[in-house]
Amino acid sequence: MNLRNHLIAALLMVIAVMAGAFLLIPGERETALMYFRDKEFEQALDRYEAQVRSGNLSPTVIMPLANLYLQYGRVESAVALLERYVEEHPDDLTARRQLGVYYMYAQRPDDYLMNLEQMTRVDIGEDQLRELSRIYNFRGDIDRQVEVLEALVRLYPDHAEDFLDLARLQANLRRFEDAAATLEQMASRFPETMTGEAVLFRVYVLLDAGESRSAFAVARQAVADAPAATLARVAGELSGPFVARSHPELALELLAPHEAALHEDPRLLALYMRLLALNGRGGEAFAALHALWRDGTLPQQAVEPLLELAVNRREVDVAFDVVARTDVMLLADWLMVATAEMALSVGRHDVALGLVEQLGEDFLQERPVLAARLAVLREDGPAIARWIGAAERRLPELDAEQRVDLATLYGRLDRRGDALALLGRVVAAGDAPADVFARVARLYVTLDAVADGLAATEAARRPTAPGPVDAAWAALAAAAGREDEAVAWLDGLPDDAAAAVTLREIHAVAADAGAWGAALAAAERLYRLRAASDDLALLTRALVMAAYDDEALAPLRPLLAVAPPPGLVAAVADRLREAGADRLAAALTPLVAAGEGDATAVPALSEAQAAVVAEAAALIAGGRAGAALPLTRPLATAGEAGAGAYLATVLAATNLGRSPLHDVLQEQTAALTDPNVTEAGRQAAVATLVQLGAFEVVLPLVETMAADMGGSWLYVFVEAATRVGAEDRLVAFLQRELDRSDLDRTAIEERLYLLTEHGGDLAVLPALARYALELGEGWIFTYEDTLQRLGRVDELAAFLERRLGLPGTDAETRRGLAFRLLDLGRKKPAEAAFRAMAAAEGPEGDNLRQLLYLWGPRPAAEQIEWLRRKAVARPEGPARGPWMRLLADLGQPHLALGLVSQEVLWASDDADLLDTALAVMAAAEERATLAAFVTHRMGREPPGPRLHALARRALTEGLYVAARHGYERLLAVDPSDRPALRGLGHAAYLNGAFDVAMGALAPYLASETGTWEDNFYMAEMLQRRGETVAARGRYVRALEVMERVAGRDRDYVLRRSHALLLHRAGRSDAGIALFRTLLEERPDDQATRAELLAALLETRRFAEAAEVMRGRQQDRPAPVPPLQPTPRPALAEAPR
């Protein structure tokens, strides 16, 4: 029983052990994991894939299998596996993160994004949101990025930059209210971050949201919080948004409290003045800036606002003074355009042309018509054509004023048809202002196309809606003889400033056309409206000319040129007394004393006429003759009595007894020299005389005034002299003026421009010679250009040399002068200039390079010595390396080697110096020194790039033993160094160590195609060993590579090697033919002759070989079947 129990117990134990052992046997999954951990990847891959095929998609299978796929580069398999898993387990974030990584590996950004979005739906984590924001930003999907950032600032509001990014995007989407709210949250949570750009951005956003006062409050608080030293600067920066968003009043309100500090910062001063102008206080700003300008204390940054104000306010003298005394390169292009346009409008062509001379034409790119006008003034034909072409291409962009300017240019260039067509388009458009339409009318008159203009303006008029085109029509109607219609239209004009501009233009057009009735009507209205001195001049002239022009005013004509007949005057006086006009009659009494007249010649005035005369007499007696004349003018056409009354009024108004024209001339001429007449009175007198065309009367007087006072008098004198044909007098005057020593820069430049315009190159040349250097670059160019045009080469060269000798001339200018001397054929002074500039330069200096070019490839001994002295002035060592290279390039390698001693050179580790020394030694053919130096350097260099370079240099220079030594050292460290294997193969082959060469080239060519030389050397060595078939294969390979070599058909040596390879590769006929061709090209080339001879002997062409040996080549006979070539090395590459 006991035995039985023992047996049962033993049996149970065995069963238990066997069951445990069975449980310990690993399954497929455990076996796969064991293989994976033991890095037995192939077995693990098989096991895991079997698990997947059996339907096991647990993470313990999926994750290792995906990693195995990556080990084998099967990224798509890994992606597909995880996609299959997450499809069944969409909420497994760990798997999704891993899938995202695999998507990146597979470069599938769209799937990566979709997976990330799915993860965010499961768990809105901060990292996922930031990654989504980054991706949406990269893709430009702003709407979705805004949604993500809104979630970020709501769920994770601990980062100020998130609020700022969100606000920027909201503003970009024009959601300004949302952006403002976001920035308010940011300011509340992170007040310390609301500085600088953040505040500026917030102000912009609030303004865009329509909350201007809130924006102002934010800006004002930011200014208040700023340190005291920066208050004004911060206020200036924050005023920018208010100006940009059309709230200049708030900008000024922000900056005004800090006005006292503005003068300490020129930029803020300029800003403040611009703000004053924007707020309607331009006069105040101009006065302040002009005062600083006059005192010489205006900072450069405020010059531009001053000029802008001067141009806008038509302060011509100030604007031109600023331009003359400022570096215009520092000013804005648009302001230079406006200045040039103003200069042209007031006849200051010199100023406009001066801007072009200083700036070039680039600043006119946006104003091609203005550029063309200036080109016309310069008489620059190519520029005229270029700019007019540019204007025509941009015609739809040009405003009406520019189109009229272009039409004016067409007229000046005899392109009448183009001018009329363009004017027609301007009129038809109907959108030009009144002053532009007045110019249109004047241009039609100038083009002798009044009928065309009248037809165009009549078609464009709208009776029910009067517009600016009506002014052009009225002027053209007057010019066409329809004065009554024009005058009727003028009577309906309102009394305002716009009407004054229109009236003046209509007067000008009517006067140019000889329509004096309409001109007089316009002048009368203009004088009544403004009563300016120049308006009175227009009126006086119109009164006189209307009498000449109008048949109804015939009774006045005898009085216009001479004193009137006394009898007629007496009769008029009697009638005036009868009408009660005693004062007016008494004014005529002195004229009656000259003789008796027939009183019955003039009938009596009517009561109405007598009343008008009486009123006029009262006005004259009160000193208001200008108002009296228009009042009585209607009487001139009211019968003889009315004409007589008008006549008497004219006589009384013009100081009695003489021609009105004569009287006006005498009175105004006297005013020019009357010490009691104010300066304004003098200007009015001159304006009157010029308007009346009295240039001969004016000329001597204004010449004196031009000399004494300059300014506008100078231009009056120029116009007067030009009108009367006194060009010689004008030229002499300008030359005398330029001899004065008291002129400032502006005055000198004015006179130079005028003398150039009216006297030409010869007349202005002496003055240019005197002033060019004093006035600076622009005038220097003008003087040099004038000398060039006149062919005065010697004077030009002397001037250029003089400039070279001036102290303070910068290097760039000196270099340009030297090149110009070269262009003039003055090599010696140019060379001296380059040598002086190169004195401080190294070998790579531009001036030294130019000097070497002038010296040629082989400089003289003195020049070489100059270079050597420059070199030894540098510290011995690396600093002299570039000089060694330069002297070697100039054919002086031995001199170059002497720059650095052997001790310094051999001890140096400077790579550039060592490379230079090697090259110079090779150029000097110092082979022993080169060999010793290379060997020495190889002993100092550790294996690496420098040792590679030394070995290559040794191989190139034929130092094969040294090259072998270097490459063997490299291979001792890295036996797989392929460049070293190739280098050793070449060096050993060329040194005759064929076994070593074979041992290096064989492994190199085992995995490389190699060059044709590599394969050729290998073939030669195989041939030596009797391996003919292998050698032939290598020859064929070498030939294939050779025939792909670029430039092979042009290089003689390569062609000779090609011929040899053709022969060795079994294409002897072709090879021998190429050898013959080469020998015909170079009959004395013994290497080619030897190669040809060897090829002929090897192919048993003994007769041809004999001919070659005798130096004679005959026509090739029929080929003899070749024998097997004898193994030998190529003569061209034979070992040394």
Image: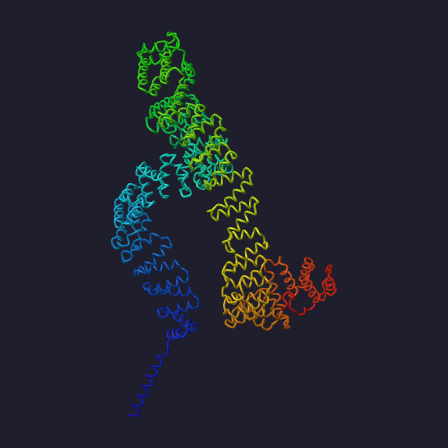
Q: Residue 661 in the image: x percent, y percent?
A: 41, 19
Q: How many marks?
A: 0
Q: Would you place residue 28 above or below residue 365 in this image?
A: below
Q: Quadrant of residue 687?
A: top left
- Occupied quadrant, residue 922: bottom right
Query: In the figure, 657 relative to 186: above or below?
Result: above
Vertical order, 171 against 647 (above or below) = below
Q: Is residue 1136 rendered to the left or right of residue 1110?
A: left
Taking the spot 53% from the left edge, 47% from the top edge, the residue there is 819
Residue found at x 44% / y 41%: 363
Taking depth in this image into account, of 572 and 150 the one nearest to the observer is 572
Closer-to-camera residue (37/1090): 1090
Colouring scheme applied when the structure was drawn: rainbow
Q: Position of residue 329 (x, y in %)?
A: 42, 43
* Residue 485 visible in image: no
Quarter of the figure that contains the C terminus = bottom right
Inspect this view and state whether residue 206 appears. Answer: yes
